[in-house]
Image (spheres, rainbow, N blue to C red):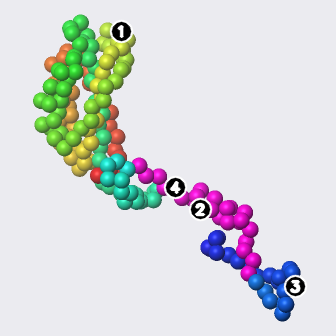
Amino acid sequence: MPLLSRTAVASDPAGSPGGRRRPRRTALVSAAAGLAVLAVGTPVAYATLGSGASPEPRPAVGAVRGQDYIETRLLFGTERPDGGPEVTDRQFLAFIDEEVTPRFPNGLTVQDGRGQWRDSRGVIERERSYELTLLYPASEARLRGRQIERIRDAYEKEYAQDAVARLEERLTADF
């Protein structure tokens, strides 16, 4: 239904010689309404970085693209329950280099945070923390699960922590 090319045929109101008929364009309001319908029905928004070229269009909502992945997030506190010095950025990044990167060389994300929780003595602790996000194919869940437990154990032992929280979610990812 082409909204903008519609025309109507009517008699010339001025009574032109020979009773000729001429096309009459639809009202401007109809064209504007048609544009509004097109604009509302077009959910397109792109942000580009770098080249300035538009990215390839993504599949429509509901279309699944990608593979099954597991996202694991680990929450690392920095305060030590034994009263020792807090874990520094340098120490944490060295821990990532030594314990995490060899097990997850394809990539990871670390974010700084602030958290609180009730420790083993019942005291509410507020502390600087780190959130580590790992993404891996669901088909590798068993192997990666063991590796993640080794990371948690190593941090708890090295920095005298009560626990390292682990959160997991199954999702679809496309790179």
Residue 18 is covered by the magenta coloring? no
- The secondary element bearing badge 4 is classed as loop
Residue toward you, 39 or 59: 39
Quarter of the image with the N terminus is: bottom right
Residue 154: percent from left, percent from top: 16, 25
Going by the numbered disc 4, the residue's amino acid type is Pro
Q: Nearer the viewer, mark 3 or mark 2?
A: 3
* Circle 1 residue: 123
Sort mark 4 into few (<14), some (14-19) or many (20+) by Cα contacts within 10 Å.
Answer: few
* Circle 4 residue: 43
Task: Give the residue drawn at x 20%, y 23%.
Answer: 92
Question: Which circle's residue, 1 or 2, is located before the other in the chain?
Answer: 2
* Circle 2 residue: 38
The span shown in magenta is 23-47
Task: Give the residue drawn at x 23%, y 13%.
Answer: 86
- The secondary element bearing badge 2 is classed as helix
Q: Nearer the viewer, mark 3 or mark 1?
A: 3
Residue 34: percent from left, percent from top: 65, 64
Could you tell whether 137 is left or right of 35 in the image? left
Going by the numbered disc 1, the residue's amino acid type is Val
Q: Can residue 157 be seen in this view?
A: no
Q: How far apart are marks 4 and 2 (CA)?
A: 10 Å
Question: Which circle's residue, 3 or 1, is located before the other in the chain?
Answer: 3
Question: Which circle's residue, 3 or 4, is located before the other in the chain?
Answer: 3
- The circle drawn on residue 12 is none
Q: Can residue 69 be seen in this view?
A: yes
In the displayed structure, 50 sits above or below 132; it is: below
